[in-house]
Amino acid sequence: MKKIGIVMGSDSDLPVIEKAIHYLQQSGVEFTVNVFSAHRTPDEAINFARTAKENGYGVIIAAAGMAAHLAGVLAANTLLPVIGIPCTSKNLDGMDALLSTVQMPPGIPVATVAIDGAKNAAILACQILAVNDDQIAKTLRDQREADTRNVLAKNLTIST
Ligand code: RP5
């Protein structure tokens, strides 16, 4: 099974990432979490991206706030798909990170999820791995079916 590499720009991003960690633990998918900053530890961030494929990763999730260039830097240094999570910070509510992450110039795409959208990032990463992994595909199908059953079981109707 290929691994998911979660990279965050700072340990202050951990509260956002926890939803991805929780989802992947529940799903039994292998992952690692590291702090590599595009500006504070650029060599380590680039080295992680350059060696990710040979180290068994199939997809990278990058979480960063403010002028969030981490996902773009990682994407520029690997052919693995990179999913960006723009993280909230106190001044601009994550809009700064959203625009920095999503507005990649043509040639180096970053698949950007919603601000603080860590669970969807984890699900999307699993879907990417599921292209070549039947076990992960089955887990994803089972989760969707469970979600459907939960909604239908509530049987919420309002009528006048
Ligand atoms: C970004 O700057 C990090 O991803 C974090 O979201 C933000 C603030 O980092 P700290 O100053 O809290 O380390 O690089």
Image (tube, rainbow, N blue to C red):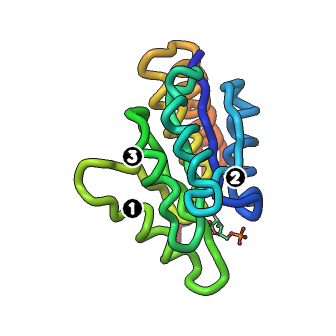
Q: Position of residue 12 (x, y in %)?
A: 75, 64
Query: Which residue does the numbered mark 2 point to in the structure image?
Result: 17
3D distance between C-alphas at marks 1 and 2: 18 Å
Left or right of residue 36, residue 160 in this image: left
Chain-order first, disc 1 or disc 3? 3
Residue visible at 38% across and 33% down in the picture: 79
* Res. 150 mark: none
| Residue closest to the eye, 141 or 62 | 62
Q: Nearer the viewer, mark 3 or mark 2?
A: 3
| Residue closest to the eye, 73 or 4 | 73
3D distance between C-alphas at marks 3 and 2: 22 Å
Q: Are marks 1 and 2 in contact (CB under 8 Å)?
A: no
Q: Position of residue 29 (x, y in %)?
A: 66, 26
Q: Are marks 1 and 3 in contact (CB under 8 Å)?
A: no
Q: Residues within 10 Å of mark 1 (few under 14, many from 20)?
A: many
Chain-order first, disc 3 or disc 2? 2
Q: Residues within 10 Å of mark 3 (few under 14, many from 20)?
A: some
Name the amino acid type tagged 3: Ala
Left or right of residue 41, residue 79 in this image: left
Query: Which residue does the numbered mark 3 point to in the structure image?
Result: 76
Q: Position of residue 150 (x, y in %)?
A: 65, 41
Name the amino acid type tagged 1: Val
Query: Which residue does the numbered mark 1 point to in the structure image?
Result: 102
Q: Quadrant of the N terminus?
A: top right
